Amino acid sequence: QVQLVESGGGSVQAGGSLRLSCVTSGRTFNNYAMGWFRQAPGKEREFVAAISRNGGTTYYADSVKGRFAISRDNAKNTVYLQMNSLKPEDTGVYYCTTGPSGAYLRTTGRGDSWGQGTQVTVSS
């Protein structure tokens, strides 16, 4: 079983930036793809971004393309989400997850293991 711990959330004004981190343990990190999802109050959890096992391929939701960047450091067992030009609609709890591939995470939303989430609040 993989354990995931997210960090880096906070409160920012619109236009600001945040960098989320997710540290994993329990399994070989580069054996699985990683993804970020978010859930706003009263809404379903939605896909944000995913990255392949070796970091060579990335996937993004249309709503964050050009503003967010996912990356991973396999030596540190960590995946990152750099969020720029934040908007109030980016507010929510952000979760990282593992999966067999980035495309699978984007298509199905079915991660194998999930972190506890980190809150991101963007004010206008």
Image: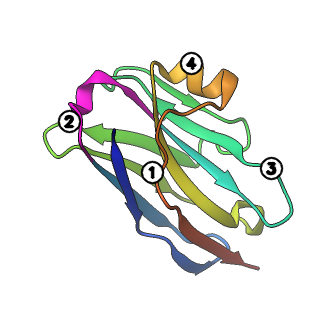
Query: In the drawing, does residue 67 fall left or right of residue 71?
Result: right
**Residue 46 lies within the magenta run:** no
Helix, strand or loop at mark 2: loop
Mark 3 residue crowding within 10 angstroms, few (<14) / some (14–19) / many (20+): few
Residue that badge 3 annotates: 44
Where does label 4 land, which residue?
103
Q: Which of marks 2 and 3 is nearer the N terminus?
A: 3
Check disc 1 and report the residue beneath it: 81
- Gap between marks 4 and 1 measured at Cα: 17 Å
Sequence-wise first label, 4 or 3: 3
The N terminus sits in image quarter: top left
Q: Where is residue 22 in the image (x, y as percent from the top left)?
A: 36, 53
Residue type for callout 3: Glu
Kind of residue at badge 2 = Asn
Mark 2–mark 1 Cα distance, whole angstroms, equals 15 Å
From this viewpoint, which residue is outermost toward the front?
1
Rendered image: mark on residue 59: none
Closer-to-camera residue (45/74): 45
